[in-house]
Image (tube, rainbow, N blue to C red):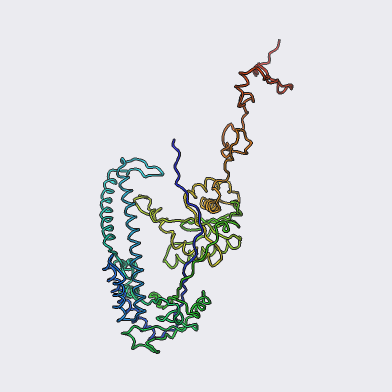
């Protein structure tokens, strides 16, 4: 039987800290005129952003600084130079994001085509292995998969052609909301409600900050006292209630979270970007402030390992965490932090933040300096071509928000003074259950496979092998090097049986029996108990007399 080939394990690394900050507050006590002006500005700038995105998509790969300048010049006449700069920058970011999504879609199609071609080449009913899937179960399924292969190949050819020609497919307002229009009953929306939500998502009320300008932003300005004013576009300048074509809102802003940091930035006239948006369901206006942070210098990996580590295994409904000391020994009992990923996006995000907060508070109480987590990426693991009928498993891994989870954990851990160590997820669950689940189980401590995986993740982050004991260097054949790793288990029959005589198991027994000079025969025992006997002992049930 050939030995299983394991893929190489990537080295652990300390994740980079957050590069930006975003805070939000509600615009309360807005007047009817305030609401009207915000709607007019958002709708007007949204139409300009829609036209600019259409022009950028038409340019495709022929885009250049000259075309960018021409688009910005055309927008300036209908708004202002700063509004035009914010719109064109947002357009470029959206186009670049679409290109990245297009590449990911092509890679997913290529993986599906490869899997289908491999399985179709196998005989019907051929069993698969852990490394490669087998054939399909029946001829009917094989035929349906051939049609599926032709469909994916057609989609792949079309996607490659679009990428070569610089064509991207962008829906301003969101494709998910667009598709909701065809399922209003399922979404429990009327056409008028959907129309309001659709138009609101297509508005544009965002302004980039400028360092050196007053309070860090000339377009949407927020004073240290919380006064919000907007530079109106040229066609809407007649709605201004302040000098220089500005409109001052009746609402006052007071950021409860990071308010001191925000105040320090605007007092020093450092760049702060603002975005105003309307929550249609609640009927509330919000203002979001964001700014970039300098690259946080991460601590060395050895420093992160100095006080031990907490290994966290990510699952579909909970975090399984275990504390380890710097030598890789588990400390205390496993901890589980549950969350629910059903419901709306806001509810799921709140559940993730709550669970992460619990993990961070427990880590602070333990006194560790870092948390180890798997560097998960399920991009190529969710296709039905790979998992076939395992629909529940595909839904399970699709529910785990790996990207949002890593972003939330890194940013929230940085505020607590903790570092995040990312490790390779290969074989952590398998080897953790093999080496740690049973030894750590006790009558009053239940160990699951996920808890053992947390131990494996922590040991890998600390630089230790996952297995509990390694084989010592064999400098000779006897047991002088210490206990062997591979030992007889308690259930192995004959492990406590009698050993063969010394003369038979000695490494030089043959040489001593063949050579007579310089050797002496083994002396017989002087005790009655150990005396050797050539006879055999027979138990007879009848007493022999006479």
Rendering quarter of residue 362: bottom right
Rendering quarter of residue 361: bottom right
Q: With respect to residue 82, does 166 lie above or below?
A: above
For the N terminus, which image quadrant?
top left
Residue nearest the viewer, comparing 324 with 509: 509
- Tell me where residue 517 appears, x and y as whole percent: 66, 17
Residue nearest the viewer, comparing 57 with 283: 57
Residue found 32% across the figure and 84% down from its top = 234
Residue nearest the viewer, comparing 341 with 540: 341
Which residue ends up furthest to the front in the rendered image? 66
For the C terminus, which image quadrant?
top right
Q: With respect to residue 54, does 39 lie above or below?
A: below
- Tell me where residue 32 appears, x and y as whole percent: 38, 86
Q: In the image, 142: left or right of 223?
A: left
- Tell me where residue 31 appears, x and y as whole percent: 41, 86
Residue found 28% across the figure and 50% down from its top = 149
Q: In the image, 546: left or right of 116?
A: right
- Tell me where residue 208 appears, x and y as whole percent: 40, 76
């Amino acid at each position: 039987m050939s030995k299983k080939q394991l893929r190489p394990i990537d080295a652990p690394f300390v994740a980079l800290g957050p590069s930006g900050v975003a805070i939000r507050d509600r615009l309360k006590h807005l007047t009817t005129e305030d609401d009207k002006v915000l709607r007019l500005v958002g709708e007007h700038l949204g139409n300009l952003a829609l036209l600019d995105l259409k022009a950028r998509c038409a340019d495709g790969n022929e885009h250049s600084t000259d075309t960018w300048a021409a688009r910005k010049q055309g927008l300036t006449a209908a708004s202002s130079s700063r509004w035009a700069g914010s719109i064109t920058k947002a357009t470029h970011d959206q186009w670049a994001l679409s290109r990245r999504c297009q590449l990911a879609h092509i890679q997913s199609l290529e993986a599906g085509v490869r899997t289908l071609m491999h399985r179709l080449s196998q005989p019907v009913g051929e069993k698969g292995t852990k490394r490669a899937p087998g054939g399909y179960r029946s001829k009917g399924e094989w035929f349906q998969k051939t049609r599926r292969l032709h469909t994916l190949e057609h989609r792949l050819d079309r996607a490659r052609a679009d990428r070569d020609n610089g064509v991207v497919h962008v829906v301003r307002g969101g494709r998910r909301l667009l598709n909701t229009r065809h399922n209003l009953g399922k979404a429990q929306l009327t056409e008028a409600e959907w129309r309001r939500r659709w138009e609101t998502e297509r508005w544009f009320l965002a302004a980039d900050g400028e360092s050196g300008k007053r309070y860090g932003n000339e377009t949407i300005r927020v004073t240290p006292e919380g006064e919000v004013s907007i530079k109106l576009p040229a066609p809407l300048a007649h709605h201004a209630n302040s000098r220089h074509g500005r409109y001052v809102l009746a609402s006052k802003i007071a950021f409860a979270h990071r308010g001191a940091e925000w105040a320090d930035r605007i007092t020093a006239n450092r760049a702060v970007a603002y975005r105003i948006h309307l929550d249609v369901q609640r009927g509330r206006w919000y203002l979001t402030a964001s700014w970039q942070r300098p690259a946080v210098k991460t601590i060395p990996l050895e420093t992160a390992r100095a006080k031990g580590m907490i290994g966290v295994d990510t699952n579909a409904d909970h975090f399984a965490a275990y504390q380890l000391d710097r030598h890789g020994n588990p400390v205390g009992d496993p901890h589980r932090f549950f969350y629910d990923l059903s419901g709306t996006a806001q509810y799921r995000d709140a559940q993730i933040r709550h669970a992460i907060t619990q993990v961070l508070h427990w880590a602070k109480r333990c006194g560790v300096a870092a948390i180890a987590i798997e560097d998960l990426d399920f991009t190529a693991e969710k296709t039905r071509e790979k998992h076939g009928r395992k629909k529940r498993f595909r839904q399970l891994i699709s529910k785990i928000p790996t990207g949002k989870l890593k972003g939330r954990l890194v940013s929230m851990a940085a505020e607590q003074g903790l570092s995040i160590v990312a490790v390779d997820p290969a074989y952590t669950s398998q080897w953790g259950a093999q080496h740690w689940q049973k030894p750590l189980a006790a009558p009053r401590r239940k160990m699951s496979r996920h808890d053992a995986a947390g131990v494996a993740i922590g040991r890998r982050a600390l630089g230790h092998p996952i297995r509990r004991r390694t084989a010592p260097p064999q400098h000779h054949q006897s047991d002088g090097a210490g206990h062997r790793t591979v030992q007889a288990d308690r259930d192995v029959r004959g492990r406590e049986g009698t050993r063969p005589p010394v003369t038979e198991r000695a490494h030089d027994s043959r040489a001593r029996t063949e050579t007579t000079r310089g050797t002496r025969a083994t002396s017989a025992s002087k005790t009655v108990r150990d005396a050797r006997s050539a006879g055999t002992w027979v138990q007879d049930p009848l007493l022999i007399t006479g």
